[in-house]
Image: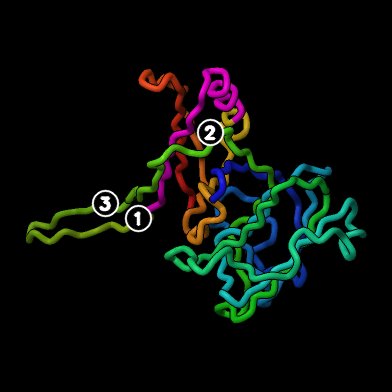
Amino acid sequence: MSNIFIATAYSFTVTATPVETVDMPASYLNNIQPGDIFQSSTADSTLEVDLGAAQSVNVIAALFTNLPADATWEIRAAATQAGLATGTIIQATAAFQMDAFPRGDGRSHGLVYLSAPVSFRWWKITLTGGTVPGGKLRMGRLFIGKAFTPTYNQSYGGGYRYISTTSYAAAKSGAVIPNPGAAPREYQAKLGYLTEAEAMTELYDIQELAGDRTPVLVLPDHQNPYAQRNLMYGFISIREPVLKAAFNTFVSVIKVTETI
């Protein structure tokens, strides 16, 4: 079991080889909404990513893909683009999917979480799609960033709920007619602290990290066998710490609203 992490992504430019499908460019991988989909012209793709400057990174994630269980990936990093061919291996060739339990809608995630951050400007991600449906690799978001881990793990009782956006109309006959809408999830958890200073410091750290404008990647436990389903990509809010008088400790509540 591992502690919850909250990560924000760096902005980047990216090129794909072979070329992307027309109107589904690799640049979409840097868009906030995963509905802006990059599509390769084949089942495979090599992405060369420029962060603009060397950045401290410990999370690399390829999100909302159509990559199946037999897909693989390799990640390298270097100080220069020319150095990528023989760059530092961050992830040796391995299965792409985080685990055997992808999202219910079939959109799989790949995640590499590094216990010690590394600092590079250039990144090369080589994806081999295997038996990818339709023969073309698709991806909704590439996330390269730095994770923040709270001092203590989330309190017991953190959980998910679905927020339905479907509306209904009742006909005179009594029939109920749905107007289907997406059902994103919401995740809420409590972060506990022994002192007010700890609580306030992390309140400001999280607010400055993401605020309400920058999407985050949140995972309660990256070692959980269902981590791929538990992974949340969305927007975070955090409440001011409150005193739990019975225990003389402090608690802040975080809430993440998923974007799908």
**Type of the residue with mark 1:** Gly
Residue at horizontal 50%, vertical 37%?
Answer: 236
What percent of the width, then of the height, locates residue 136?
62, 75
Kindly identify the residue that appears in the image at 56 percent across and 74 percent down.
68
Left or right of 47? Residue 219 is left
Which of the 4 image quarters holds residue 179? bottom left
Identify the mark at residue 200; answer none if there is no mark.
none
The structure residue drawn at horizontal position 26% and vertical position 51%, both measured from the top left corner, is 167
Q: Of 169 and 113, which appears nearest the observer?
A: 113
Amino acid type at mark 3: Ser
- Where in the figure is residue 218, as x and y percent of width and height? 54, 46
Secondary structure under the numbered disc 1 in the rendered image: loop
Q: Report the residue marked by disc 2.
A: 212
Mark 1 vs 3, N-terminal side: 3
- Looking at the rendering, the stretch of residues picked out in magenta corresponds to 183-205
> Could you tell me how far apart the alpha carbons at marks 1 and 3 are, in whole angstroms?
7 Å
Residues at circles 1 and 3 in contact by the CB criterion of under 8 Å: yes
Question: Dot 1 corresponds to which residue?
Answer: 181
Instruction: Work out whether residue 139 or residue 78 is closer to the camera in this orientation and state it.
Output: 78
Specify which label sits upstream in the sequence, 3 or 2.
Answer: 3
| Residue 29 visible somewhere in the drawing | no
Badge 1 crowding class, 10 Å Cα cut-off, few under 14, some 14 to 19, many 20 or more, is few
The local secondary structure at tag 2 comes to loop
Question: Please, is residue 14 above or below residue 194 in the view?
Answer: below
The residue under label 3 is 167
Q: Position of residue 201 (x, y in %)?
A: 59, 23
Q: Secondary structure at mark 3?
A: strand
Decide: is 176 above or below 9.
below
Q: Is residue 102 above or below residue 243?
A: below
What residue is rendered at 59% in x and 67% in y? 97
Q: Estimate how packed mark 3 is, as few (under 14), some (14 to 19) or many (20 or more) residues with alpha carbons within 10 Å.
A: few
Give the total of numbered labels: 3
